[in-house]
């Protein structure tokens, strides 16, 4: 089923219809309900941290999920008729600015990592990684995860080309491949965490490592859900060759996740381990 967006209609005092390309959002109860649910979830988190009572957090989390499902359902229905070319340009710009804010978010963590690693202080043994930290081998699970994310970036691009070409069968298969690779990446990341020889409380290296990779993993989960929703929408024929902004946003978000992981792999896994290897080689030379 194909949907063609139409112009929004407003009625003036003279009972004349003025057609324009902008979308006047109708009053909605979802923002206030979602805010109340999020407040309940935050209250529940505090209760769990202080008194180990998790029922309020669980209820708040369930309410937030239900609110988001209802809210996004309404947005999807609006996209069929109200998202004109002008509205789509505004949404694209808004999502680009959102990705820019995400770049700044990760930039702060990269800055903290480089600040501590370029000139390690005596408090961490004047070396990076700090004394007592055994980093991961970058050529095992981290390299495999890098290949998986690069392949998923190629498959999501394949889906985009299939949608533009009107080939629904290829787009469906590309969605399945991308979702499989995304879930596989998350599972490998969890396995890596279980095998880690250090924790988040083990100095600045542990804090930076788990914060950066953990937030990236959280973005991977969000991106996976984003793509799964787009896959269902594609199955039901919501996307056309010229009107598939929801999928474009998901694809941009996933490419952003790919790029962030490349920086994580180079700086945390490869560069950090390389410093330790050079230090070990230098010490072996002194012994000789």
Image (spheres, rainbow, N blue to C red):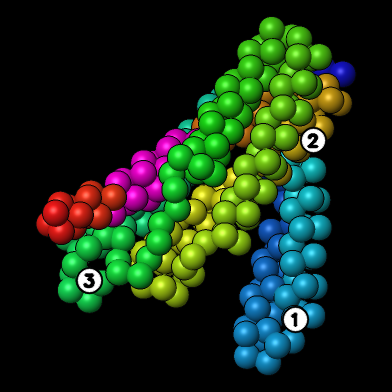
- The answer to whether any part of residue 12 appears in the image is no
- Using the image as rendered, state which of residue 241 and residue 18 is in the foreground: 241
Q: Residue at horizontal 22%, vertical 76%?
A: 123
Q: Is 87 drawn above or below residue 123 in the view shown?
A: above
The x, y position of residue 216, in whole percent, is: 52, 50
- Using the image as rendered, state which of residue 246 and residue 182 is in the foreground: 182
Q: Main secondary structure of the magenta part?
A: helix
Q: Is 102 drawn above or below residue 20 in the view shown?
A: below
Nearer to us of marks 2 and 3 is 3
In primary-sequence order, the first of circles 2 and 3 is: 2
* Image side of residue 134 versus residue 176, left or right: left
Q: Residue at horizontal 30%, vertical 66%?
A: 130
Q: Which residue is mark 2?
A: 77
Q: Decide: marks 2, 3 in contact (CB < 8 A)?
A: no
Q: Decide: marks 1, 3 in contact (CB < 8 A)?
A: no
Badge 2: residue crowd in 10 Å (few <14, some 14–19, many ≥20) = few
Q: Which residue is mark 3?
A: 125
């Amino acid at each position: 089923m194909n949907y063609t967006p139409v112009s929004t209609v407003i009625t003036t005092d003279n009972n004349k219809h003025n057609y324009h390309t902008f979308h006047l959002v109708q009053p909605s109860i979802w923002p206030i309900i979602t805010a109340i649910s999020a407040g309940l979830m935050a209250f529940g988190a505090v209760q769990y941290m202080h008194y180990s009572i998790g029922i309020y957090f669980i209820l708040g989390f369930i309410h937030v999920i239900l609110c988001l499902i209802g809210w996004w359902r309404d947005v999807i229905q609006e996209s069929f008729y109200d998202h004109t070319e002008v509205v789509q340009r505004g949404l694209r710009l808004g999502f680009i600015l959102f990705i820019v804010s995400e770049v700044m978010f990760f930039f702060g963590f990269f800055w903290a990592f480089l600040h501590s690693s370029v000139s390690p202080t005596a408090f961490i043994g004047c070396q990076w990684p700090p004394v007592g930290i055994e980093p991961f081998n970058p050529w095992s699970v981290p390299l495999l995860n890098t290949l998986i994310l690069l392949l998923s970036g190629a498959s999501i691009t394949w889906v985009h080309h299939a949608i533009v070409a009107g080939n629904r069968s290829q787009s469906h298969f590309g969605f399945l491949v991308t979702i499989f690779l995304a879930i596989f990446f998350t599972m490998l990341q969890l396995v890596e965490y279980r095998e880690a020889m250090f924790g988040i409380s083990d100095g600045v290296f542990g804090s930076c490592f788990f914060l950066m990779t953990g937030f990236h993993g959280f973005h991977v989960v969000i991106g996976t859900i984003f793509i799964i929703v787009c896959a269902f929408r594609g199955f039901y024929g919501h996307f056309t060759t010229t009107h598939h902004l929801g999928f474009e946003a998901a694809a941009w978000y996933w490419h952003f996740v790919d790029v962030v992981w490349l920086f994580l792999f180079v700086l945390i896994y490869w560069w950090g381990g390389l410093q330790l290897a050079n230090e070990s080689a230098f010490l072996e030379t002194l012994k000789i």
